[in-house]
Image (spheres, rainbow, N blue to C red):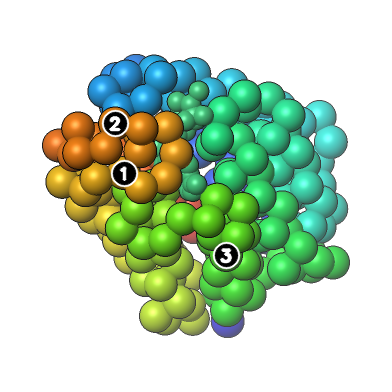
Amino acid sequence: GTEISLPTLVSWVTLFRDRIAAEQGRLTELDSAIGDADHGANMARGTAAAAAKLDETPPATVDALGKTVGMALVSTVGGASGPLYGTFFLRFGTQAAGAAALDGAALAAALRAGAEGVVARGKASAGDKTMLDAMLPAVEAFEADPSDPAAAASAAAGAARAGSDATEPLVARKGRASYLGERSAGHLDPGSVSTALLFEALAEALA
Ligand code: ADP
Ligand code: MG
Ligand code: MG
């Protein structure tokens, strides 16, 4: 099948950074409604650091890319989202250890491993109004037909956005927003919106 090269995966991360930078104000606004108003700044800082590290030390394997991005996110984001996205990229890389390129099936497996890492780390489930409400449907959509990675990523991006939109009426059961109880309903989950940007960036990188 179609090979996804390391430079394509690097461009995924830089496009994610660009989308986060463009939507930073919106992410902050969402987090000010049900959190502590730092999700935009957290993600802007983390993704800028990750992209800078990739530029400084170009990875030779998918594993190295995952480690560089994951460590940058964990060490620069002082919020829940840093360790969670950090774990996503670390597990993404470990799943593809040693590979210098991925085919669609290997990319699907790496995305699944990343999402499972977020589940293991944050102990949230579908419907808890977290980033997983975008990530789990996105990975499932990608897995449906990974033989055409560009089409799979486009389907994943659509599923991530729909999953994020569907967080609006939910009551948060994990993270800071859960402190609000019923008052968390009526707002999008900020982390689900940043995850929609992650999969939109992937679709753009693979297009
Ligand atoms: P903090 O809440 O520490 O300020 P951020 O504002 O950067 O961190 O990130 C908040 C986002 O993290 C939430 O919108 C939610 O999507 C996600 N999140 C929080 N806790 C969890 C969890 N246990 N599992 C998955 N995602 C979570
Ligand atoms: Mg916050
Ligand atoms: Mg915070």
Q: Are marks 1 and 2 in contact (CB under 8 Å)?
A: yes
Relative to residue 100, is residue 160 depicted above or below? Answer: above
CA gap between label 2 and label 3 equals 27 Å
- Percent from the top left, x then y, of residue 202? 48, 52
Q: Secondary structure at mark 3?
A: helix
Q: Secondary structure at mark 1?
A: loop
- Earlier sequence position, callout 2 versus callout 3: 3
- Left or right: where does residue 87 sit relative to residue 145? right
Q: Closest to the observer: 33 or 200?
A: 33
Dot 2, crowdedness within 10 Å: few (<14), some or many (≥20)?
A: some
The numbered mark at residue 35 is: none
Q: Is mark 1 within 8 Å of ligand 1?
A: yes
- Left or right: where does residue 144 sit relative to residue 43? left
Q: Which residue is mark 3?
A: 116
Residue that appears at 58% across and 45% down: 84
Q: Amino acid at mark 2?
A: Leu
Q: Amino acid at mark 1?
A: Ala
Q: Which residue is mark 1?
A: 172
CA gap between label 1 and label 2 equals 8 Å
Q: Are marks 3 and 1 in contact (CB under 8 Å)?
A: no
The numbered mark at residue 180 is: 2
- Percent from the top left, x then y, of residue 10? 65, 45
